[in-house]
Each structure stands twice: as C-alpha cells, then as structure tokens.
Image (cartoon, helix red, strand yellow):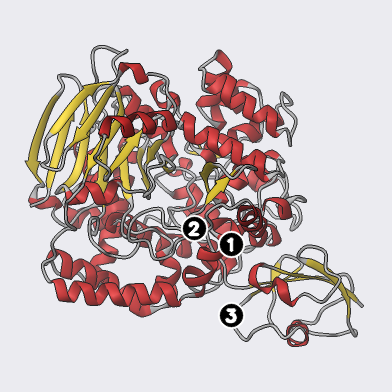
Amino acid sequence: MRKIVRVDMSDLSVRTEPLPEKWARYGGRALTDAIVFSEVPPAADPLGPENKLVFAPGILGGTTAPNGGRISAGAKSPLTGGIKESNAGGQAAHALAKLGIAALVIEGAPADKDARYLVKIAQDGSVELKRVDEWAGAGNYAVADGIKQMMGDTKRYATITIGPAGEMGMKMAGIAVSDPDGYPNRFCGRGGLGAVMGSKGVKAIVLVDEGLPTVEHADRDAFNAAVKKFAAALREHAVTGQGLPTYGTNILANIINEAGGYPTRNFSSGRFELVEQISGERQREVTLERGGNVKHGCHTGCVIQCSRYWVDADGRYLTKGPEYESVWSLGADCGIGDLDDVAALDRACGDIGIDTIETGVMLGVYMESGRLAFGDGKGALRLLEEEVRKGTDLGRILGDGAEATGVAFGVKRIPVVKHQGLPAYDPRPIQGIGVTYATSPMGADHTAGYSITANVLNVGGSVDPLKPDGQAELSKGLQIATGMLDSMGFCIFVAFAVLDIPEAFDAISEMAAAHTGQPWDADALMELGKETLAMERLYNEAIGFGPEHDRLPRFFYEEKLPPHEAVFTVPEADLDSVFDFVPETAAKMGISKPGA
Amino acid sequence: MRVELALFASLRRYLPEGAHGHERTIDLPDGTTVGQVIALLHLPDEPRVVFVNGRHAPDDQRLHDGDRLAVFPPVAGG
C-alpha cells in the first residue's frame, strides 16, 4: 500500500497515512497537483504556512521502467503565483517509491526562522528531524558533503537540498536532487520551489534506500515484457538511441540557431554568431579532451544516457552538462560565447540553488538595462557570487528573476509569461512553442508541451514553425501527453521515441497495467494527462488567472525577429482553444474548484 | 553558383576538404537541387533534417546562388 508521509514544520510532527483511494491512479505531477488542489487554499501565501511542498515519484517510480525515475515537486509558486509542478531526474524518486511513499508533504512553517532542519527517512520508514543550523547559507555542494559525512558507512541514499537562495526566499530558487554519484546537480528548477522549501525551514531531505528492493508488480512477467519493448524502442529511435547519448541535450544549439529561433542577447535576434563555440559538438570535443564523462544516466534505469560532466582545465568535476537550456540562457541570451564561462555560471547556479533558465533570462534583461555588457561572463559570475549568493539589496532583486529585475531597472523587453522567464526557443519563428509558453498553467515552460518536435526536429510529424496554422492543436496534444508522462515519472525525452514508434506508446499502458494491476490503456493515459491539466487550470482560475494571462508579452507580436523577421501570429481564439476540454474533464472528475 | 554548405553532428565528416568548422562554400551548377547535393556528398540514407536559409526544405527544392544549405541527422534535446 502506497502511503503519504506528512511532515508538519509548525510543530515538527510526522504523520503517515495510506494513499486515499481517489488518488490510487495518481503519481508524480497528477499527485502533487491533486494534493495542492485539495489542500492549499488558492489565496495562500506561497511562502507562508498554508502552502505545502509535495514530492512525488511517478506511478512507475521505484521500478525498472526505462527512464521512469523523475521526481515531481509541487506547490503554489512564489514566482508565477499559480500552481506549480517542477520535475527532475536524480535518485530521489526511486528512493521514495522503494520506501513505499507516494507523496512526501512538507507542511506548516517553523516559528523559529533561524532554524534549519534536515528531514531523514530511514530504510524502515522512520522519519527524523535534525537541526542543522550550522548549514545556514551553505551551498548545495557543501550540504552534499555534510550529508556524506553524516551518513558514514551508509552509501545508498538520495538527497533533496536547497542553497542560500532558497533560504532567502528568492523567487528563482530551485531544489537540487542528487544524481547517481551523489552530486546535487539535478534540479526541480522552475517556479521558485526552493523558496517554498526554505520557508519551511527545511535545508535538506535524505532518503535512505540502502538494501531496499525495487517495488513489486501486480504481474511481473507482463511488466518485464513491456519494459523490454519500451527499452528496445528507445534504443532504436535515432534521437534517443544515438543523438542524445552521443552529444547530450546541447546538440540542439546548432539546429535551433539554424532555424533562426535561438534567442540571443535578451531575445533581440534568433541567431548567435558564436554558437559554434558553445554548441553540443564543441562541448563534446572539449569534455573528451579534458577527460570528462560524456555519457551517463542522471538516474538509475535511464536508457538514453544524455547526461555528462563538465570538468575544468585541470580535469576536475565542475558541474553536469551543462544542458542545452542552461548553455543557451547563460550563453547566447547573455551574448556569452565561452563554454568555460557558461560552465562557471552553471556551477554557481547549482551551488547557490537557482534555476539556470530564470537566471540567464534575468541576466539578459539586466544586461539590456546597460548595467553590465552583453558577453561579460566574468561580470555575470560576480553578480551571482557577490550579490545573489550574499543576498545584497541588488542580489535580492536579481534573485527574484527576470521580471523583477526588468521592472526594477526599467527594461521594456521582459520575456516572461505568468512572471516566469521564457526558455531557449523564440516563439516568433517557432510558433508552436509560443502556444505552450502562453497557455501552460506553469507559465513559460518548454517542457509542458514541447512543440519543437514537429516544428523543427521533424519528430512526431511536421508543422511549419513560421505559420500560425496547427500550432494550438499541436501544443494541446503535447501538453496532454506531457501531463501523463510527468505523472508516470517518465523523462519527457521518451516522447521522441513514443511519437514515432507506436509500440513504445503501447508499452507505457502495458507497464502501468502490469505494475499496478489497474486497467490502463491508451484512452486512460490521455485521460490522466487531461485530469492533471484540469486541476492546474481550475486552481489557477480560482486565483484569478484568465485568458488575458494566456498571452505572450506584446513585443513578440510587434518586434520582428531576425533572420526571418518573424512576429508571433497565432490568433487569440486559437490560444483560448487549447484548454477547451477542461469543463468536460472536470465534470467527469466531479471537481469544479479547489478544495477537498 | 556558390552555396554555403553546413553539416552538423555525425554528418560533419561528410564535408568536402577545406571546411571551416561545420561549413564550407561549394560551387554547383545552376539549378542543383537539395537532393542532388546530398547524393553528391554521399550522405547516409537515413532520416535527416534539411534547412535552406533557415527553413525546412524538401529534396526537390532548387538552390540559388548565395543560399545556405544545412543538414542535420535526427537530433533533439531540451
């Protein structure tokens, strides 16, 4: 029986309860959404005691389902003001699932604002709260080292930690999750969830899964057969079987640049003249020259293996990847064309505990204000280390992200939707992703409906990226599918194979059915995606989000982006059609507004 | 006519000699199509993504002087 573990930071009590029957088919994003939807009042202060921070492995967490080890973190977001789910790889999802935990809920807030706690869940499920006040202000890497010393001979555990940004309540603070080598380098980065964790006084969570077996299945043979089928599809597809493992996610830099959609210098151009120097191909060459690792999984059970470690000139580990989004945000969007500068910024983000996307977009906006030159990587690093990490007056503004920074310094071009910075694809020449940015309940989020597939990569069909036709339909289908994948606990990169290989899609419902013993089929999978989105939309509606919030900033409609001289042209009626299924889905679920 | 050719990732090794990075300028007879260039380069018969001047292009598209032709193997990320 899966259970919910609740840690109340107001009185330091712990409660364990069985997962309610109504949520028996939920995991990951669907479950964090359901708990936030039911239990966090829409008017709650995101950094107050009424908010809850929920961690949930996917439905297939703790199993051998390939790439099924993503962890979802959910809460009301201090950045967007709406419901938030942000997911990461790393080892925490498998550890939680092996401990029998469907959701770990951090509630309340401690009276003593200077207290720092470590929440440790041992193999037997016992929960211990330990004061770690001496870790106040420490970076994620120092905390990881502290935990390692504390754990002594226990080697198998996962960590969930925050850096100083989370403690200070900064709106771009993320949550770090440890990878298979124990590095705190996988991130629930978006939406300021690190600040929510900080507001609870929780500096670190340690999940001990040493000696615990994988989770049992209702039908083991059927499960293993479906796993085999799924893994074969991931290995067969050119993207998941060859491109991603060889070059990593940053293989995208050249192709997005070629398509004219690589946002450069705060979204003022779609091409970056120095892209070659920060491309995935170059990154691979340098990493190999320096003896870095160029192929590993970010969590146990990953078949794709797109992760890698960046090492400095002396061959010492500095950070993971850096990933495509981070190389773009900290590179091209800031006019920085040096991979060592980008990696140093990525490491700083990881240690301070801030979202690399929001940080890069913030820096691009700050540079546009004229206070720092585009291309000044050392100056950008100084801002992160001396201002953001230390929480100076300037650092507090920058730490609240791109919009806060743009408003404070009078910048007109602020690329955000629902207060969250846009990721690495300009929505003018790639209009499908613009629909996702505009309409996702998450705010501007590429993963929520990754239309780059059909718009640029010719995966899962082809939709002309420069025209408005078909973009809303494309984004809608992908947002529903992503809601499902995020609830199963899958890495969304499986979608590249799933979109092109029918057997891979079949294997998902077969794995879910064989694992849970519940009936799962293609329709049920899509229904899960719709239910997830319905809860998110209704929650945001109760807060006051309406169609007017499902829009891009005006400059995307008015300023032509070179080289295609493109503007965003998807009609408002199309944007408003993306969530037309919500009333019907909500009626079927028997929900209309947040609450129990 | 002169066309700027760019080949990326695993296709880079098919660039003619004298390439700079991912790119090389090549001389072609007027009216050469995308497909003819791909055949000329002996690119593997596998899925690919082709752009002419930053827009997707089919194999039968004719090239013009000054065009940029870029070819990628299947890639993705994010």
Total marks drawn? 3
> Residue A116's quadrant in the figure?
top left
Disc 2, SS: helix
The disc labelled 2 sits on which kind of residue? Asp
Disc 1, SS: loop
Residue at (76, 65) in percent of width and height: B22
Image height of B7 relative to A297, above or below: below
| The label number, if any, that marks residue A574 in the structure image | 2
The disc labelled 1 sits on which kind of residue? Pro
Whether residues under marks 1 and 2 lie with C-beta atoms below 8 angstroms apart, the answer is yes
Looking at the image, is mark 2 or mark 3 nearer the viewer?
A: 3
Report the side of B14 relative to A54 (left or right). right
Residue holding disc 3: B47
| The label number, if any, that marks residue A155 in the structure image | none
CA neighbours of label 3 inside 10 A, class few (<14), some (14 to 19), many (20+):
few
CA neighbours of label 2 inside 10 A, class few (<14), some (14 to 19), many (20+):
some
Q: Position of residue A195 (x, y in %)?
A: 38, 27
